Amino acid sequence: MHFVEVAIQNVRGFSPSGRFPLKTGYVILKPPTADVLPMANLVLSLLFADGRGGDASLVGSAGRSGKAALTFVGQDGMTYRVLRELGGSGSLHRLNPATNQPELVSTDVSEINQYLRGQAGLPPRTTFEQVYCLQLVMLPSRRPRKSVAKAAAAAAAGGKASGATPSLAVAAQVLPAEDVPAAEAKVKVLEKELVTAREVDQLQFKVDELASLIFEADAKLKGGEGLKSAIADAEAAWRAAPSPESLGLPLDILSRVKRYPKAVARRDEALARLETDRDPELEDASLRVPPLTQNRVFWGGLGAGVLFMGLSVGLGIAAAQPLWRYLALINIPAFGTAAWTALRYVDDLQKATKRGSKDNRKDARQKKILDEFELEDAPVRMAVKALNLESYTEIPAALEQKDLLGIRLGELQTQLEEFEASAEYQGALRDAQDLRAQQEALNAELSAKGTYVRDLREVERELSRLKESIALAKAPPVQVAAAPGQTPAPVDPLEDPSPLVLSQAADVLTSDMLNVQALLKDRCVQYLTALTDRRYQGVEWDREGNAFLLTQNQRIPVGELPPKDIDLYYLALRLTVVEKTCARVKRPFLLDDVLTGVDEAKLPLVARMLKHLGTLTQVLHVTAHPGFGQMSDGTVNV
């Protein structure tokens, strides 16, 4: 998981508006002014919206609306974009990889939170905040000491803490005497606000519980989504399957394919029979009849007749004897022979003509046989070409797919009807309707409490600090400096941050406390010795996660360390937890400008540590210090 882009408009601490791409690796976010840049708070508000408008505090200029959007790649590899109007509504979009266009997932806060947890792979808010966010207020030196918390709890209960009044040495703020009445009046206002915040917190708890129940009911209802998707796919496949109508083929194409082999056999048999039925004189009939002009008998008879006719006429006139005229009688057999030859030629020509006509009839018969076969063959060839097949034998299987897909579609529709008619589905449907009605009623009740109610813990902290200040203002003066020869009064220890961090790391690593301690110990010692110039050589944790640092001669509880050293230990522990958890699941590490109290000489060392961490996961470090920019993989002016 990593962040891709953050877009803002009128957000406190950022530029007035802009879109800022975020690279992977170690990236520096440089704020435009000296104001604190609430990058971690902005990300938490976008990814874990409370639905009560708590993010309105991030709006920059008053009287104008603020908007923010975060684009990130989830654990499932999908790209998501969370868009929110600060103090108002929001939406979640998912990038469709097929169309490369964003698709709306939901605009409901509860659904968005559930979806980001279930699909995008976000951890719970507490885990993300305590493991993957490091803010200035998280440093142990910035938290009240244990006696302060005890005194505040006792004051809230209406009693006094055991022992003397709180020590001035640990007071966060001592009020002047003239400001005490105003502070007490503010305490009453805060107590009323605390009641309202507690009611809102309880209502929000119920809303979150209902959202979880609605999510479970919707999960049961969405059990049919797989069937619906399968039905849609089956219907699309059924519509796309080839059919005689869609291909423009005869409706009886399957029956034509079945009788196609018989048609082929019938054609072959008819052609074979046509060949065997031909006359023996077929070869003679195919010969050409010689023309009459090439017949010598014809020309001989004709020539002899003309010769004797000429002789009879010429000799009879010349001799003046009629006896020569009888030569003309020889013309009769001569001309008869020529006539007989001509008649025979005509007879042969008639016979040849008759034989040619008979051959024409056989050709016509052959053409008729082929035309009849073409009526059966043409649709089959067209089907083979339309279906892109190798042989006509594959046509039935290709066309039967539509019927098989239709049967499958009917089965899926029957399954969906049975699922939606089941008692479990109907019960989940009724439960979802009832739960949504209850959710709407609770949301209406939340709206009636006010558009913006501060978080319960924030009100409790402010009330505790104010009561502590009042108690310190009313307390009699105490001797701060110890008398000569006396031991100074002990200072109450700081709170040990280890149990909370270790328990959250155990949740991420799905392991128990002891195994997590064994996994983190060596690496945490490496970070710690480097940051403290080897003043501490080791670290130990007890079963509850309380930490003890080891020197050459001592075993010191973390809470009793100097504020600077406990902050360095906390930084070493947080870097170790991020390094080890990112080996299991990669999530961005958001680091505010928490290194202001670290010695300048150690900043290059810290930069190298963060640079190494950037090779394992995305590290976003908010700082204006120029030294970190030289070690980073990129700088973004936000």
Image (cartoon, rainbow, N blue to C red):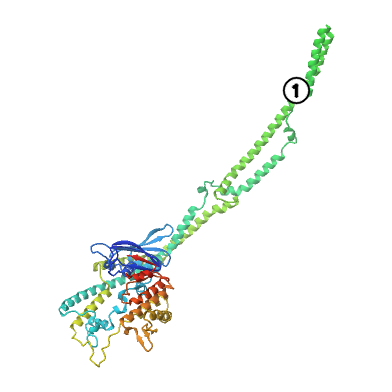
| Left or right: where 571 falls relative to 467 | right
**Residue 495 in the image, given as x and y percentages of width and height:** 31, 81
Counting the numbered discs, the total is 1
Residue 296 picture location, percent across and down: 78, 24
**Residue 238 placement, left or right of 329:** left
Q: Nearer the viewer, residue 282 or 255?
A: 282
Left of 418 or right of it: where is 139? Answer: left
Residue 244 visible? The answer is: yes
Tag 1 secondary structure: helix
In front: 439, or 126? 126
- Residue 407: percent from left, percent from top: 50, 57
Do we see residue 107 in this rendering?
Answer: no
User: Which amino acid lies under the numbered mark 1 shown in the image of this protein?
Assistant: Ala
Residue to which mark 1 is pinned: 342
Which residue extends farthest left?
178
Residue 275's spot in the image, x, y percent?
70, 40
- Farthest bottom residue in view: 485
Residue 77 higher or lower than 608, as above or below: above
- In the rendered view of the protein, which quadrant contains the N terminus? bottom left
Indicate the quadrant where residue 149 lies. Answer: bottom left
What residue sits 72% from the left and 40% below the top? 276
The answer to whether 548 appears left or right of 193 in the picture is right
Q: Is residue 148 above or below residue 369?
A: below
Instruction: Please tell me which residue lies in front, 186 or 435.
Output: 186
Check the picture and name the quadrant holding the C terminus.
bottom left
Quarter of the image holding residue 520?
bottom left
- Farthest residue toward the top? 320
